[in-house]
Amino acid sequence: MKKWLLLLLTMVAFKISFAQQLEAFEDSGKYGIKESATGKIVVQAKYDEIYTYSEGLAMVNLNSKYGYIDKAGKEVIAPQYAEANAFSEGLAAVSTGDNWGYIGKTGAIVIPFDYQEANSFSEGLAAVVSDDRAGFIDKTGKYVIPLQYDYASPFSQGLAIVEKDGVSGIIDQRGNFLVPMKYQEIDDFAEGMAAVNKDGKWGYINRQGDEVIKPEYDYVFAFSEGIAGVMIGDKGGYIDINGNIVIPMIYDKLGIFSHGFSLVEISGKQFYIDKRGNCIEREGLTCPK
């Protein structure tokens, strides 16, 4: 079953760097923060985990409790929560262990602990779950979109993916459907395209909800640098945003393009290709004979 919300702590920062040249360090199984250039310790190594800074505060874990520190190392909100999210739009979703609510940057409770689950705020709204139903609240805690879905994603560029009774659609911030509930799955948008699953086959829709690439693939990747990996059976290649095959369907495994290259595999041999499908020898990988 799909998790209710994308909310848990997935950004553990055991080695992190920041704009002001700070980095995490380990000492005897504990973590602190030091200046990258001088080695000066800003935060003593006393935490079990340190997470990436967001809006000037970083989550820390001490004895399975979560709190927040500022960039000077001051413990602004003492570790006291069973679960927590990074700050987003001035608020952080935190859990007592029984219920979720929202706090401000001083630690004051802004939205009461009334929710079974709670996601971070995005574009002024946050997905929450109560009585096993998901909906959206604003920063006053008012329900903007009622609790009626089995799953709800965060809003991104005015749109959110929702799921109910095994089918998915896309809504706007008023709860109106851009894409009706007709797909088995909808992935997040990337480069204006979202992969959709219809009757067991994958294709793509654009941000207007148009099915621009017919669902005919067994597996697909997100678009990156204008192309996406697709597979039919056990062979895959790459298509452009018009659905044209631009790199032939000859690979056993595919990667996602980054900086003009992607990792692929044929008969157990891994190598890099460029966006024309030419093999490029790099990072110690050679082309197949």
Image: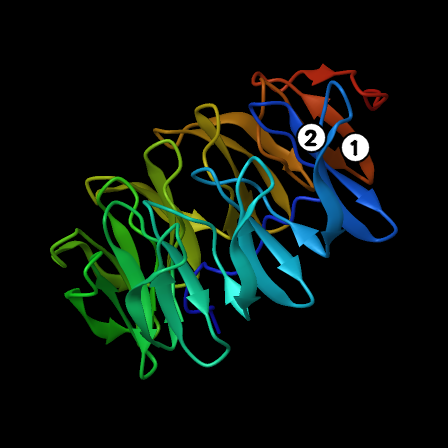
Q: Residue furthest bottom?
A: 131
Q: Which of the image's four quarters has the C terminus? A: top right
- Check disc 1 and report the residue beneath it: 270
Q: Which mark is residue 263?
A: 2
- Of 197 and 83, nearer the camera is 83
Q: Amino acid at mark 1?
A: Gln
**In which quadrant of the rendered view does residue 163 lie?**
bottom left
Task: Find residue 196 and report its horizontal and vertical position in percent.
Answer: 37, 52
Residue 184 shows up from this direction: no
Callouts 2 and 1 close, C-beta under 8 Å: yes
Q: Indicate how the structure is coloured in the image.
A: rainbow
* 10 sits to left or right of 104: right
Q: Residue at x 20, y 58 (%)?
A: 138
Name above or below for residue 104 compared with residue 43: below
Task: Find residue 85 and report its horizontal and vertical position in percent.
Answer: 47, 56
- Of 159 and 96, nearer the camera is 96
Secondary structure type for disc 1: strand
Secondary structure type for disc 2: strand
Q: Residue at x 16, y 65 (%)?
A: 142
Name above or below for residue 124 compared with residue 268: below
Q: Which mark is residue 118?
A: none
Q: Residue at x 60, y 66 (%)?
A: 65
Q: Residue at x 79, y 32 (%)?
A: 270
Q: Label 1: how many residues lie within 10 Å, few (<14), some (14-19) or many (20+)? A: some
Name above or below for residue 9 compared with residue 122: below
